[in-house]
Amino acid sequence: MLPQEATNEGYEPLMPADADPVTPALDQQIEAACNRIAPVWPLDRFVAVNPFHGLVDQRFEEAAATLRRIADARMYMPRSWYHEQLQAGRITDDDLCEAACLCGSGLTPQQLRDAAAAERQGPAGGVPLLTALVDELDADDWSSFVVERISHHCAAYFDMGQATWKRPWEGMSLYAAWRRFASLDYSLTMMGQDGMRARVKALPESPRACIASAIRRLGIPETAALDYMHAALMDIGGWAAWTRLLRWEAELNGGSDDTIVELLAIRLAWDMLLYEHKSTPAIRPRWREICARLGRGDTGAGVGGDRTATGGNDAEVEHVLLTALEQGYQRRLIDQLAAGGDGKTPETRPAVQAAFCIDVRSEIIRRAFETVCPKAQTLGFAGFFGVPIEHVPLGAVEPRSHMPVLLTPTYQVCSALLDEHGQGADADEEEEALATQRRRTGILKSWKAFKMGASSCFSFVEAAGLLLYAPKIIADSFGWSRPVAAPDDLHLDEATERRVGPTLDTPHHGPCAHHHEHESIGIPEADRVPLAEGILKAMSMTDNFARLVLLVGHGSTVVNNPHATGLDCGACGGMTGEASARVGAALLNDPQVRKGLVTRGIEIPADTWFIGAQHDTCTDAVRLYDTHRLPAGYAEELAELKSWLKQAGELTRLQRAARLGLESQSLRAVTANVQHRSRDWAQVRPEWALAGCAAFIAAPRARTRGLDLGGRTFLHDYHWQQDEGYGVLELIMTAPMVVAGWINLQYYGSTTDNRRFGSGNKVLHNVVGGAIGVLEGNAGDLRVGLPMQSLHDGKQWMHEPVRLSVFLEAPQQAIDDIIARHDLVRQMLDNGWLHLFRMDDDGGMHRRVPGAGWQQLSQEALPAAA
């Protein structure tokens, strides 16, 4: 049904609020549109997320077609880029043949080569919104104006402390606050539409009723309503992702949140208001044509006319080329695995054991550590080390989750000032430390608030800004500054700060104990033994313990980088791994825990000591925590361990040097350069983080030890023979494997279409709302994903956009059973978001082909794991 405005010169007044009931069908479409959006996490816990998460129920190639049809978004690289890979030999004719077979395509290698060489640029697509049509026929850019006004309102509404003025709509919903705000917004007067402000007040009070009214009055056919709402949300995709996070977190805690529905109502209300106020004889028939096309499922070529929809052979070519590129990488990796690692496992007691995060950056330093200390044993495990905590730093009252965002913390632990035995310090001593921290932190906060205040914006900066800042500007610009403090710098002297750490117990004093006096703090003693048992079994570490065992988390020390937490540990919810490593070490050093473990068949020798540590992935230095508590008899071993770690860091930096453009420099110069990058305020590429990530391997280290995997592989130690009931395998496949897949797809989407799924040029970033996210420039939509500088070095892509290839050494039936029990895992595998391979004990390699089961790749056996 077309709106009344489509046939009259003027417009009719808005109907009463209840005139457009929300039918069950429309309600389902609203939910479907909202759930197609993936969440985005704030800057202070920026973690990787699959930007296509809302479409994992579709096959990869179907999702690509959906996004191209809805928002003209790309999920494949340009054909010219695939042509470059063909020319470079990264894709062979055999890869093309195998890929065509896997994709069910009849295209020949020559046809694919010809297609890659002939770049085809079709006209822009996407579901046309009403604002786009008005733009075409009006002198003003209404599309940008609407996005800017919505973004302005959302930034103010969701502000996390950046704004100094109190919000006038405290306690109101997003939609209700917008109605009040828009009715007073004089920017509409500047656009020549002063009367539109009064019209906002007549909108339905219910967001869903507003959506129903907009769909009816715009004349959107029922069959096209879902696509139109999806396109409307994609038009403000950054804020849609933010509001989707609110729903995600509410659902994780058993609740619900409709803020994203309110955002959709706001966006559709703008279209409805514009149609009423800008409708002309030229616009109305064009809009009727567009609605008719949408009803037939044809988005056409935007608002400009018909075109052949992207699909068919075009989409087939791109999907086969992507699969061929992946096939080439998989072939090379399988060849490495076939050649086998050194197959060595410690037959005697290891000189030291070090459990690193599965992060691809850890693959390099693990290999380097094993090189300088061949008698060492390294392990790979998710960087939260199986400790399900949220952590409250010293002096803080709000906890931060240190777990993958797919999971919910079980315990809350607090940092406190500890004595030499790891017990809580005297109340007066801790209060003195807290007073020092509050004083120093308060000075910094007051100075920051003054700098941002209205009174100091012009006159103060002009009179005193350069005078006060000149020394710092010069020092920062030339790299003369002292090493930058960590993000969680406590502003205490070094001796006192060394005594601060997380405790397993409930603090008896301090702000943490006072603020949470009615909540359970710490890890209850009754839970500690089963928790420790689960951690050790999950790490396949149940015997042959070394005297020193490291739990090595990771973080990155950089400055002037809004996305800095994206360089930290994704398994720790965007935090560093420090708290998790130190809590895990404290738990496993607890004498009572060790006694309890003996009754469960795990005996940790009395001379084994666990040490929490952190790998700085920017400088490749490893910091050890709480070593002052080590007994005196470990002094020589500790000194030797520090020497090994220093050498391993040097080897790691040398391998990373090539990607940083430092391959021609000496070791000393490389070390100085990476340290300079970590504190250079103008450095847009302090490290490459997880760029290049392409594979996930869960198998004994003997499979990969000694192999140079190029820092592209997540390595998780796993011995299925020790996994009774396959609970550890289930944990791996439902958490680390999925998180690794999310990281891979975030890098993938940010590379293939940075405009939609990335955050553009980080030089232009401005932080919004304190820590919500960034704008590129001073207006526009909230940006999601990774900046270009994290993916491209100015000359070439540093990330190769391929889907993650997962290799598991485990029985087929156990893998199949876990897939059958978990919808998300099944969707990601069956719909081609991940590739899955299985390794047999005797070395056989099998590929899981969606819809066709397991297929053996070769009769040649891989070397059996030791």
Image (cartoon, rainbow, N blue to C red):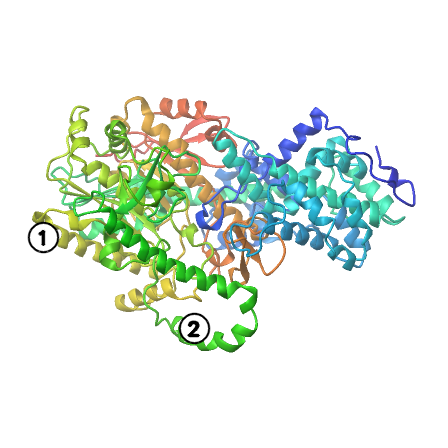
Question: Image point 66% across, 49% down: which residue?
Answer: 150
Residue 244 rendering spot, x and y as whole percentages? 56, 39
Amino acid type at mark 1: Glu
Residue 641 rendering spot, x and y as whole percentages? 16, 52
Q: Determine whether, in the image, residue 487 is placed left or right of residue 164.
A: left
Q: Nearer the viewer, mark 1 or mark 2?
A: 2
Quarter residue 704 falls in: top left
Q: Earlier in the sequence, mark 1 or mark 2?
A: 2
Number of residue marks: 2
Residue 233 rendering spot, x and y as whole percentages? 65, 42
Quadrant the C terminus occupies: top left
Estimate how packed mark 2 is, as few (under 14), some (14 to 19) or many (20 or more) residues with alpha carbons within 10 Å.
some
Amino acid type at mark 2: Ile
**Which residue is identified by label 2?**
473
Question: Image point 38% across, 73% down: which residue?
Answer: 475
Q: Where is 594 relative to 128, above or below?
A: above
| Residue 385 visible at all | yes
Q: Where is 100 relative to 134, above or below?
A: above
Quarter residue 315 falls in: top right
Q: Nearer the viewer, residue 395 or 391?
A: 395
**Which residue is identified by label 1?**
636
